[in-house]
């Protein structure tokens, strides 16, 4: 399929329906930055077009893509001056909650490829979409 502005619009619409406008924009920004940083780093390391197109297979390029996403998140993170979210007085933030959610996703994705595993359909779809990256999810307890 040839990529076009219309294709990008359809993708943005789908992401907005699932995640809302701002998170969709954030995900696309991080994805574009990761794609460009990973391709550049992998091309510089391998000197090949094929290497640049499969940057997630090169550890150095993957690290650069990750750094670009982390930088965007760091810059766009709320500041101390940002108004706090409204919450009930008895509800406190849970330390490590984000990592716990990520571990849950990684565990489900790692197990989604196992026949008869009670994984929901969304995780099976994510496992399929991740391709060879899904195999890395098996290591989530070691990282």
Image: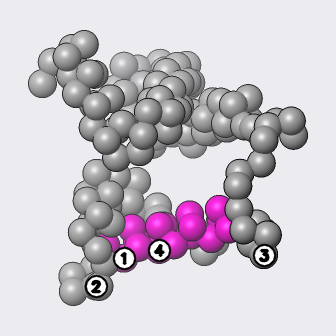
Q: What secondary structure characterizes most of the magenta part?
A: helix
Q: Quadrant of the N terminus?
A: top left
Please name the residue shown 65% across and 62% down the image. Answer: 98
Asked if residue 104 is among those painted magenta in the image, a careful observer would answer yes
* Magenta residues, start to end: 94-112
Label 3 close to label 2 by CB (< 8 Å): no
- The image quadrant of residue 8 is top left
Residue hosting label 3: 90
Distance from Cα at disc 2 to Cα at disc 4: 12 Å
Residue hosting label 4: 107
Residue hosting label 2: 117
Distance from Cα at disc 3 to Cα at disc 2: 37 Å
In terms of sequence position, does the residue under pointer 2 or pointer 1 come before the other?
1
Label 1 close to label 4 by CB (< 8 Å): yes
In terms of sequence position, does the residue under pointer 2 or pointer 4 come before the other?
4
Label 2 close to label 1 by CB (< 8 Å): yes
Label 4 close to label 3 by CB (< 8 Å): no
Q: Is residue 31 visible?
A: no
In terms of sequence position, does the residue under pointer 3 or pointer 2 come before the other?
3
Comparing marks 3 and 1, which lies closer to the viewer?
Answer: 3
Please name the residue shown 71% across and 62% down the image. Answer: 87
Residue hosting label 1: 111
- The image quadrant of residue 80 is top right
Q: Quadrant of the C terminus?
A: bottom right
Q: Mark 4 falls on what kind of element?
A: helix
From the top left corner, tell me how far across and down residue 46 is, in percent: 49, 25
Please name the residue shown 44% across and 33% down the image. Answer: 21
Q: Mark 2 falls on what kind of element?
A: loop
């Amino acid at each position: 399929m040839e990529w076009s502005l219309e294709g990008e619009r359809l993708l943005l619409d789908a992401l907005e329906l699932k995640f809302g406008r701002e998170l969709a924009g954030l995900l696309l920004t991080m994805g574009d930055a990761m794609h460009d940083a990973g391709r550049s780093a992998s091309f510089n390391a391998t000197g090949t077009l094929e290497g640049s197109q499969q940057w997630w297979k090169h550890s150095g390029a993957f690290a650069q893509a990750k750094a670009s996403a982390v930088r965007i998140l760091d810059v766009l993170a709320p500041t101390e001056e940002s108004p706090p979210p409204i919450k009930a007085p008895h509800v406190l933030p849970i330390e490590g909650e984000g990592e716990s959610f990520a571990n849950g996703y990684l565990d489900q994705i790692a197990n989604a490829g196992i026949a008869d595993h009670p994984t929901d359909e969304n995780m099976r779809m994510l496992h399929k979409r991740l391709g060879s990256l899904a195999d890395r999810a098996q290591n989530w307890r070691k990282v």
